[in-house]
Structures are given as structure tokens and as C-alpha cells.
Amino acid sequence: MPQDFFGRIVYILQTRGLSYLDGAKNTMIIALVSTLIGCIIGFAVGIVQTIPVSKNDNIIKRGLLWIVRLVLNAYVEVFRGTPMMAQAMFIYFGSSVLFNINMSMWFAAFFIVSINTGAYMAETVRGGILSIDPGQTEGAKAIGMTHVQTMLYVILPQALRNIMPQIGNNLIINIKDTCVLSVIGIVELFYAAKSVAGAYYTYFESFTVAMVVYFVLTFACSRILRFWEGKMDGSDSYDLATTDTLAHTSGLYNYPGKEEDEWTENK
């Protein structure tokens, strides 16, 4: 074992580099799949929480919706208000004790991170839907759209663009937070680094490598998501108001002959 810092890092990479790569692969698989499932859960919960209710609705509908929202709110508050490590221990070991369900470690990993992400995404989706101008909903209903059609074709596409940064943020958080799954035996990046540190007694060097790998993963994902956000924004050269008569009176649109008209008026 070399005596200098960088020499030990090189030695660790040469002897245990594959362990880090395998841990990073498992980290990314768990983070990507769980973020996708969590987004689906979050969209479902967020949409249910924003279903409009009026006094004219059937009392059965209002009662069922109240019960469903109560359960969903409890789910969101519990999983947002407790740490993921405690959730992992409770679900993985508690499911066996309370319900005699023996989960595999991988199923437990996906399940834990997904429902945790879903709780955060539910509030994000709810806020994204409520951020859309109510006039959009009123306009959709005015042309005969149902609530489902309005959500699918009018509200959700706009809300998705607004909450894309938060979806990316959740992915970055999940890449880092998969380290808590080491408590149930998942061999992810943190677990691999801990194993190397215990084998060579090189904690500083081993976790330095782990931090660099975490940074590379999160930085690469953030750049990709920024690129995707830019694609969703579309082109900067849109010319949508050229046929709008109001645009001519607003003074914001330069149409042929405008300068000549202004010169004539001033004269």
C-alpha cells in the first residue's frame, strides 16, 4: 500500500475500481427507476388532490373524495416528515414482523425510494397544477372538454414544464440518498466505499473516490436535465401574434408601413 494520498487512491482504483463501478451502476438504477415510479405516484396523488368539488356534487362523491384525500394527505405528511433511513428499516424489517412479508432487498429498495419520492412529487404536482391560470380550465370547459380531457391536454402539459426542475432535483436527491439503503444490505456506491475503507483502513481515500463518483453522476444528470428543459422550451424565434389585430394597436409589433404611419401622425 503506497504511503502518499494520491498513491493510495490510485491503488484503490486499481484493485477495487470495479466495486465502485458496480456500486455506481446500482445507485443509478435505483435512482432512475424509483424517480420514474415516484413521479407516476406523485402525479396520481397530485391530480386527485386538485379535483374540484362543489356543493352541487353528489354527497357520495364528496364523501369518497374526502376520505381518499385524507388518506393521501396522511401518506404525504408521514413520508415527508420522516427520514428515509428510518422508513427503510421500518418497511424492510417491519413488514416481516407485522405482516409476515419477506421482501427481497431490491424490491424493498425500489419500493422505499419510490414512495418517498412520490410523497414529495405529490406536493410538487399539486403546486404545478394550481400555478396554471384558472382561465385555462375555464376556456377548456367552455369548448366542451371534460375534467379529464382538460387535465390531459391543457393543464398537465403546462404543469409538467413548470415542475421539470423539481423532477430533476428529486433525481439528484435520490442518487445521493440511495446511500441510506446500505442499512438493509443494498450494495450501492456508499456500501462499496464503506467495504473498501474497511478492507484497507483508508477511510479518507475511499470516501474521496466515492464523493468524486457521486459528483460526476449528479453533475452529468443535471446537465442532461437542463438540456431537456431547453428542448421543452422550444425555439426562441416564435412569431405567434403576427395576425392578431390587437398586436397592431399595442405598439409592440413592427408591421410594414408602421414607421411611415408614425411619421405622418407626428407631422
Image (cartoon, rainbow, N blue to C red):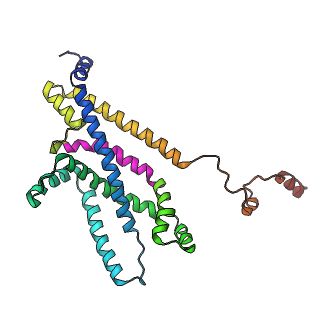
The percent coordinates of residue 236 (x first, y second) are 61, 46
Residue 185 falls in which quadrant of the image? top left
Can residue 131 be seen in the rendering of this structure?
no
Q: Residue at x 38, y 47 (%)?
A: 169
Q: Which residues are magenta?
A: 162-181
Asked if the stretch drawn in magenta spans residue 180, the answer is: yes
Residue at left 42%, top 61%? Answer: 127
Looking at the image, which residue sits at the far right? 267
Residue at left offset 17%, top offset 29%: 197
Lateral position of residue 148 relative to residue 199, left or right = right
Residue 125, percent from left and from top: 40, 59
Is 213 rendered above or below residue 46? above
Residue 35 or residue 179, whichever sits in front: 35
| Image quadrant assignment for residue 17 | top left
Tag count in the figure?
0
- Residue 94, image x, y percentages: 12, 56
Q: Position of residue 62 (x, y in %)?
A: 35, 79
Secondary structure of the magenta portion, mostly? helix
Say left or right for 83 vs 28.
Answer: left
Q: Is residue 97 visible?
A: yes
Q: Quadrant of the N terminus?
A: top left
| Of 15 and 148, the residue lying toward us | 148
- Residue drawn 33% across the image and 49% down it: 35
Please state, as top left, top right, bottom left or bottom right, where the C terminus lies in the image. bottom right
